[in-house]
Image (tube, coloured by chain):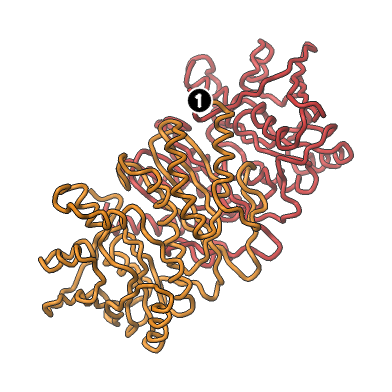
Chain colours: A red, B orange
Amino acid sequence: MSTSEFELIRSFFASATVQRPDVLLGIGDDCAVLQVPAGRSLAVSMDTLVEDRHFSSEVDPAALGHKALAVNLSDLAAVGADPAWATLSLTLPQPDVAWLGSFMQGFAALADRYGVQLVGGDLTRGPLSITLQLHGLVTPELVLRRSGGQAGDHLLVSGSLGDAALALCATQERPAANPGCAALRERLDRPTPRIALGRLLRGRASAAIDVSDGLLADLNHLCTASGVGARIELAELPLSAEVAARGKQGDWSCPLSGGDDYELLFSVPPARLDALLSDCRDAGEPVQVIGSLAAEPGIELRYPDGRLVKEVPRGFDHFQG
Amino acid sequence: MSTSEFELIRSFFASATVQRPDVLLGIGDDCAVLQVPAGRSLAVSMDTLVEDRHFSSEVDPAALGHKALAVNLSDLAAVGADPAWATLSLTLPQPDVAWLGSFMQGFAALADRYGVQLVGGDLTRGPLSITLQLHGLVTPELVLRRSGGQAGDHLLVSGSLGDAALALCATQERPAANPGCAALRERLDRPTPRIALGRLLRGRASAAIDVSDGLLADLNHLCTASGVGARIELAELPLSAEVAARGKQGDWSCPLSGGDDYELLFSVPPARLDALLSDCRDAGEPVQVIGSLAAEPGIELRYPDGRLVKEVPRGFDHFQG
């Protein structure tokens, strides 16, 4: 690829997304220079997706562009931030204009929906890997944190759990086992970031985290940071028909330990629950009470048959097996 | 690696660098939350280093930790920003605590020198790759840009040019050709970011860029952005003895087209030159006038023997060869 083609791609990146007035210098200088409004703080999230680790080589590049941004939007949602600017480092085995075009189409469609401008990054050659940093704006007094949950708070989760894990499982292990899993696959490839819900939770949830490594692992992070335990009612988990059917057969692994849900898990003091549920209904944000926080440490699961099981949390670990 | 070991590394990262009072949430939540002071803007730079592309597997991890931060510090210097916060995405083939410790030692030593706190990032498994984003603070009216250079402005460069390229060349192609190249090697492995010089240039240089892809390529960027041309006096280039010796033999490739210098290239209006040179001397910042900007486009090189050659810029391109 010649330098002029390289410049073409750079200018393609520069105009790929919405143009925000708070970008003083964008793509094409040594740094991007960005204006954070008075009274607001900067929230940043960085995630890397590596081929054969986080996605297979067959994945649609447009879905990958969507997902690279969505996983970071989910982190911003979890602190209640408004998305603003993205930087993107793409490492590609070879220059592939068709691949880049498709990737950026998926990326820009989601970026435009949330008013995110791509302002900088890097383009290098090597094994396929995508690192995205997303910058958001948040009012410091209203930042949602993992800490702050109290015994007695209700525990809620958005959307549904385990769909992405089941889709991955169906793809990797038993391609024929779930013939009608297109909807699940969509949940794996194009997760819905809960930005609007994060905004609703500002100043109202006592603690929040996004569920990316599995419900139990992320609940454990929230409980550890808050110094509490929790009980989950498995019968209350919001599940798709496919994931629920597995639960009926005794297999709860997808909703409890599967990764890639990108839903919000949060705690709400009892006095604030009804108003919040009502606002979520009005806003069309699907949330469900799935349990509560408790004074004693550890996570207790109540199975639909009434059994109580103390769970040792095990989430997705990038350095395991 | 177990989850608890993973957490250990995370807490190791969290305490690796200086702790800044403007970090509201650091490592360990979904986002870092950072306080940009009133009247200042955010400058961000992101660079990726890929094994076998930007460094060999034999490189000292501590040098790599230094370099990952230094190349981004150089970008911040080029816009005149004060370094503040870093986010780091590390992709490693396998967990290697000794490697991580050494990498972070090199990183933290440089971070502490510039008051940079590591506030977040990602740790994943895959082919060795390092993406670092650095965040700095800059007064918007004083941001240095590539544009703004005027015909007649003096052209200056800091430090010396071509050392890193010669070191790379000596290592890769002719290991025995330069037995005494430890000092050059140090320039390749541990470049000196010109943060203090960037501060001196704020509001005084008409245009600035950091020389990372080779003098001609980066000068071409500055000229294109400023809508001017330039003339360089090769006899005035600041060169180490080793690089100068090659020039005497007619080989100017290292200082003109070699990458990895991480010096600042900048233009200064004639009326401001003497005061700036004097301040640079007082501050111990080595700078050298190497030519001037011109109205007609293109880059003209005057060789020490008086020959004038119009140069077609060719810099380092990550998608070439």
- Residue B265 falls in which quadrant of the image? bottom left
Q: Give neighbour class at mark 1: few <14, some 14-19, many 20+ (Cα, 10 Å).
A: few
Residue ID for mark 1: A320
* Residue A17 visible in the picture: no
Where is residue A213 shown, x and y percent of the image? Answer: 60, 31
Extreme bottom residue here? B271
Q: Pointer 1 indicates a residue of which chain?
A: A
Where is residue A95 shown, x and y percent of the image? Answer: 32, 46
Amino acid type shown at disc 1: Gln
Where is residue B209 shown, x and y percent of the image? Answer: 38, 68
Where is residue B81 shown, x and y percent of the image? Answer: 50, 66
- Vertical relation: B41 (above or below) B130: below
Q: Nearer the viewer, residue A14 or B71?
A: B71
In the image, taking residue A216 as reference, residue A121 lies left or right, namely left
- Residue A149 falls in which quadrant of the image? top right
Q: Nearer the viewer, residue B299 or B289?
A: B289
* Residue A5 visible in the picture: yes
Q: Secondary structure at mark 1?
A: loop
The residue sitting at 57% across, 34% down in the picture is B8
- Vertical relation: A258 (above or below) A130: above
The residue sitting at 31% across, 76% down in the picture is B288
Extreme right residue here? A271
